Amino acid sequence: MRASQYLIATLKETPADAEVVSHQLMLRAGMIRKLASGLYTWLPMGLRVLRKVEAIVRTEMDKSGAQEVLMPAVQPAELWEESGRWFQYGSELLRLKDRHERDFCVGPTHEEVITDLIRNELKSYKQLPANFYQIQTKFRDERRPRFGLMRAREFLMKDAYSFHASTSSLDDTYQIMYQTYHNIFTRLGLEFRAVQADSGSIGGNSSHEFHVLAQSGEDAIAFSNESDFAANIELAAAIPETTERPAATQDMMKVATPEQKTIEAVSTFLKVSPQQTIKTLIVHGEEENTLVALVLRGDHTLNEIKAEKLTSVAEPLQFASDAEIKAACGAEPGSIGPVGLGIEVIVDRSAAVLGDFVCGANEDHMHLTGVNWERDCTPTRIEDIRNVLEGDLSPDGKGTLEIKRGIEVGHIFKLGNKYSAAMNASVLDENGKAVIMEMGCYGIGVSRIVASSIEQNHDDNGIIWPASIAPFSLVLVPLNMHKSEVVAQKAEELYNRFTEMGVDVLLDDRNERPGVKFADMELIGIPHRVVISERGLKQGTLEYKGRQDSESQDIAVDEAITYLNQKLES
Amino acid sequence: MRASQYLIATLKETPADAEVVSHQLMLRAGMIRKLASGLYTWLPMGLRVLRKVEAIVRTEMDKSGAQEVLMPAVQPAELWEESGRWFQYGSELLRLKDRHERDFCVGPTHEEVITDLIRNELKSYKQLPANFYQIQTKFRDERRPRFGLMRAREFLMKDAYSFHASTSSLDDTYQIMYQTYHNIFTRLGLEFRAVQADSGSIGGNSSHEFHVLAQSGEDAIAFSNESDFAANIELAAAIPETTERPAATQDMMKVATPEQKTIEAVSTFLKVSPQQTIKTLIVHGEEENTLVALVLRGDHTLNEIKAEKLTSVAEPLQFASDAEIKAACGAEPGSIGPVGLGIEVIVDRSAAVLGDFVCGANEDHMHLTGVNWERDCTPTRIEDIRNVLEGDLSPDGKGTLEIKRGIEVGHIFKLGNKYSAAMNASVLDENGKAVIMEMGCYGIGVSRIVASSIEQNHDDNGIIWPASIAPFSLVLVPLNMHKSEVVAQKAEELYNRFTEMGVDVLLDDRNERPGVKFADMELIGIPHRVVISERGLKQGTLEYKGRQDSESQDIAVDEAITYLNQKLES
């Protein structure tokens, strides 16, 4: 491609309303433009990236044996009524009426449509398993679209749906999809983790999220440094303590802790480590007008997802107000503890193995030291309610945990018979008996991958694309091409040569200053750059620079093709 | 692809609600399924065809220098208000409100969005011309969707929009697009015609439609057998008569023609050829309560589009009622003629060169013979108001006209400044002065092409795909594969060989009777079929049959690859 005949729409200024770096860089590099809130037009430069991501996803899905279909974006309400989602789904479902006043929606997902299709097409267990996918434009009417493509309203999605006569067949396809997703994200050149997204049971595999790791990620992910264990921190189980609770060595004593309200303040004041203290949080109970105490080791934080799943705790989790705490416990929040508390006390497993610990005395400005479970107060229950910490042992027993932030770009999920039962999608089994099919669903946010790739790979100068999805692999920058015939000739020669070789090469033949070209090409993130200058050609050299190299280097003109081929292949 | 692992969803019965052959065959061959009125899901077999069409369109558009973009399907009302179309566009525009009650539509076309984009991105005449296209899902809320993909509500479209600083630049790009469309439809393997779609002025080229020729086409197209002249019959100009009107040789006489009301009846009764008679049609005039007579040669038919464009004729054309005719002319419709008629008389050019002709006498059951213009009655005006006939001289002076029916699948159009002026889309010219851009737009109905290809190419057994868009190029049909090891082995060998060669090959390894397989593959329309049987292999032969061959033929196993390669390439 010749840059002079291509829309290079780079911007010098960072648009004011772009909050995250991928949004900023995609606007600045001329990849996308906003049409309206949450609606973006893909410019030629950005679309090249999107199409490359799409092609990788398609190739790997085809390899997995999935069959591509294409379903309408606009879907009739009847099917959604049949599944029950027409009423359940909130305002994110973009509903509309056609000219005959019939109800439709612009689909955010296609479970109903595919289930309807398959219940009509497949009749026998012999036709199963079958897995159908599409790469298609979806719409989710986000209340507050933001972060560019990270939370857009219209987006490109790969969604797949598998159908089975048995759960073991579903398990098999689920594993194939797990591996396929692994292959896809590996080929995309992204650092990613497959994360357990089910309710934390170790080894449970009924749902996995695939996260691209990036500091700006919305989710914190805990993963083992030795195994493939990875879980959203919200769901990561803390490994049970293996140490026994030590025997009591101190008497319980009440001490004054004036104005010391936080764990840090109290532990400093009393000269004990935070690990030797506990914190007591008061939340609403499941039964009306009840409160529940949640007790954690001082250096731990509450995992709200784990807590609200406990029976006797209200869901969603609701913290008691200061007034409620004062009324129930007799003290301000800074001085609460489990001793003598007249409400249910749920103790985290790590707090439950402490001895001689410090806690609030349920009396303002007072704490207790030398407290011991059973002797001084008895936990109602011991549970896992804390967030895991970096350095914790991995719950699968292999290695210790690291914690990084991630952006969800894929999700595989065992639907079971949720949709097939509601919509009566069955096949005949070996005995001629109708059985409701088992289903799996498998999504990838195709347009979101483009943004998350940038969140993971960028620097002050712009985007750093993985080789597999860069809009162009190589840019040729001739200096003074319009004045120097020898430069123009060499540039054209190389451009033709690489084009013939099937390399995605951009010839920056724009009538711009070198500095402008260099800055644009770094911003756009083209992996390899070759500068052709009259001075260099006189010496028989070209100047090469990789996108992440700090310095450029001279390469012999004669060896340029070989040299660049090696770079392009590496 | 192995058929056993692919959705072969053929139907024995023709679905009752499918009116046209493409719709019937796409359903029967398992290419599409209806989701709701005008909404279709593409099954794997159909999607392969759609993707091949899409790829050809994309390749040729890229070659033309157009740049691919992707605009949102959902568009904000503001832009449509700016262009004025929010109010002009009828119920075919699918309007909706988002969760914040803002107005949007699901786009049937993207002039507003691209014009908004380009007015923001391009600033200088130096950046022009530029041509942007997308291949994208569109929605048109048809009042009565029908004919399957021929008039669906959701459909896949290639739409392109070009921008120019001058009309001559627009002319250049228009010509490039004309040629590109020619290349696309040629590569698609379709018989087509580029048809003038402007208001009939010869040599006019501000709009062309591209029609796939098919008997079921909605439009009749007149085209020269010697030149590239082609026009929708509604707009095709009749060439002016070159003969002089002969001098009168007969006296005008009134003759009784009892019960003879049609041209055929009258001419038979009076023993004259229809070409020697005229017919007189009475229509409403442009001014209220006026009538106008339109006079044609007896064997010609009225072109209503030409007629309603005439000043003094009401638009849309409205025929006078029998009562109105009786009141104004004094006779029933079967006996009307121009002689002594007290209203404006517009005579077609071919009728105007007749002498000694027959016409109604404006008296029931009476006609006049030996009538001559000027002597007996005077035309108010002479105009071109007839439909052209097969065999007419071509209006461009080259060859004679043929008439065929066509399906519109493409349209190229000079928009001029319609949108750019309304939306103030300008660039700075050489002198730094803002000039409104000229625009062109260029559409192709990608999904419609699939259907129209079938309308053009099918037989009693099913679809006949052009090689370039067939879902599979070659099908291997092993007989008794599950019992005969030698058959299975040869089938697998050939399948692997062709797969490696990059041939789209389908191995019909289903456990079905040969007759079922043959019928399915003919219905689906795979161009080449090879049968592998134990009997044949014993003789060292395979059985080959092209989709349109009446008989199969034996080919030597050893020469099969060479033989089939020749077939696949031809």
Image (cartoon, coloured by chain):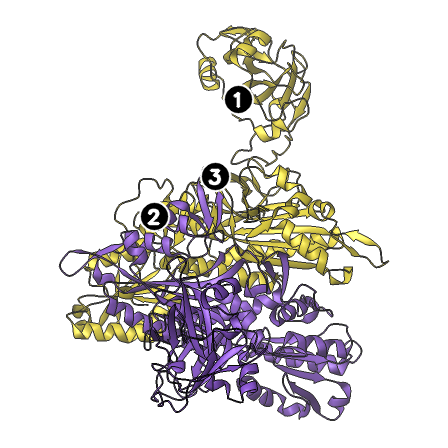
Chain colours: A purple, B yellow
Residue B392 lies in quadrant: top right
Can residue B158 be seen in this snapshot? yes
In what element is the residue under mark 1? loop
Disc 2 vs disc 1: Cβ atoms closer than 8 Å? Answer: no
Q: Residue furthest left?
A: A431
Looking at the picture, do discs 2 and 1 lie on one chain?
no
Q: For label 2, count other residues whose C-alpha is less than 10 Å away and answer few (under 14), some (14-19) or many (20+).
A: some
Rendered image: mark on residue B218 = 3
**Is residue B545 positioned above or below A503 on the image?**
above
What's the amino acid at mark 2? Glu
Q: Position of residue B271 (x, y in %)?
A: 47, 16
Name above or below for residue B395 compared with residue A44.
above
Q: CA distance from mark 2 to mark 3?
A: 39 Å
What residue sits 51% from the left and 40% below the top?
A: B402
Q: Nearer the viewer, mark 2 or mark 3?
A: 2
From the viewer's perspective, is the residue at label 2 or at label 1 nearer?
2
Across and down, in percent, residue B232 comes to: 56, 39
Please say if A183 is above or below A135.
below
Contact flag, marks 3 and 1 (Cβ < 8 Å): no
- Looking at the image, residue A33 sits to the left or right of residue B151; the answer is right
Specify the subunit that label 2 lies on: A
Question: For this rendering, which residue is in front, A9 or B57?
Answer: A9
The quadrant of the image that shows the N terminus of chain A is bottom right
Residue A106 position, x and y percent, is 48, 51
Q: Are marks 3 and 1 on the same chain?
A: yes
Q: Which mark is residue A82?
A: 2
Residue drawn at x 76%, y 79% is: A514
Mark 1 — residue? B298
